[in-house]
Image: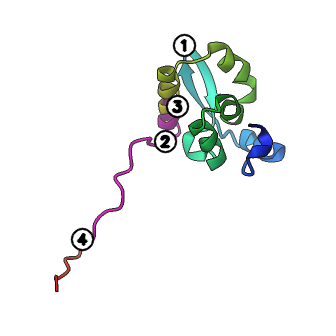
Amino acid sequence: MTRDDFDDEATPAEAQEIEAEGHFVTAMLADEEIRIVPPGAWRQSWQTALSNANFTFFAEQVVHPDDLDLYFEIDPTNDEFEAFVAEAARRGGESLGKSRGPAGSSRRTRRR
């Protein structure tokens, strides 16, 4: 899978805009501070790459370019990665909790 496989990837200009806006949070990974795009700002194509175990492409999209070599050097375990993303979500003011799904109607309806 290559970058061309994803239509929703950020263009270089968009990536610079995200970085200029400071759209990164820091989170600890193996005792190192790594900058990452908060999970709520991930594009669907990045999430798809993660779901398809394309970790290299995914990391290239969400980890700050200056921290990318360190991220790959750390080569996190799944547990370390999960904790890293959870911390990034907390620092970004987001929750990664499971969705409860749609709420039932609060209005009672009469059965016929």
**Badge 1 amino acid:** Asp
Residue drawn at the location 48% of the way across and 28% of the way down: 82
Looking at the image, is mark 2 or mark 4 nearer the viewer? 4
Separation (CA) of disc 1 from disc 2 = 22 Å
Is 98 colored magenta in this rendering? yes
Separation (CA) of disc 2 from disc 4 = 29 Å
- Image position, residue 27 (x, y; %): 55, 26
**Badge 2 amino acid:** Gly
Looking at the image, is mark 1 or mark 2 nearer the viewer? 1
Which residue carries the number 2 mark?
93
Residue drawn at the location 78% of the way across and 40% of the way down: 3
Q: Give the class, few, some or many, for how many residues have Cα within 10 Å of label 2's Cα (few <14, many ≥20).
A: few
**Badge 4 amino acid:** Ser
Counting residues from the start of the chain, the first of labels 1 and 4 encountered is 1
Which residue carries the number 1 mark?
31
Residue drawn at the location 62% of the way across and 23% of the way down: 34
**Badge 3 amino acid:** Val
Q: Look at the picture and state if 110 lies above or below 40.
A: below
Instruction: Quarter of the image for the N terminus: give it.
Output: top right
Counting residues from the start of the chain, the first of labels 1 and 2 encountered is 1
**Which span is picked out in magenta?**
87-106
Which residue carries the number 3 mark?
85
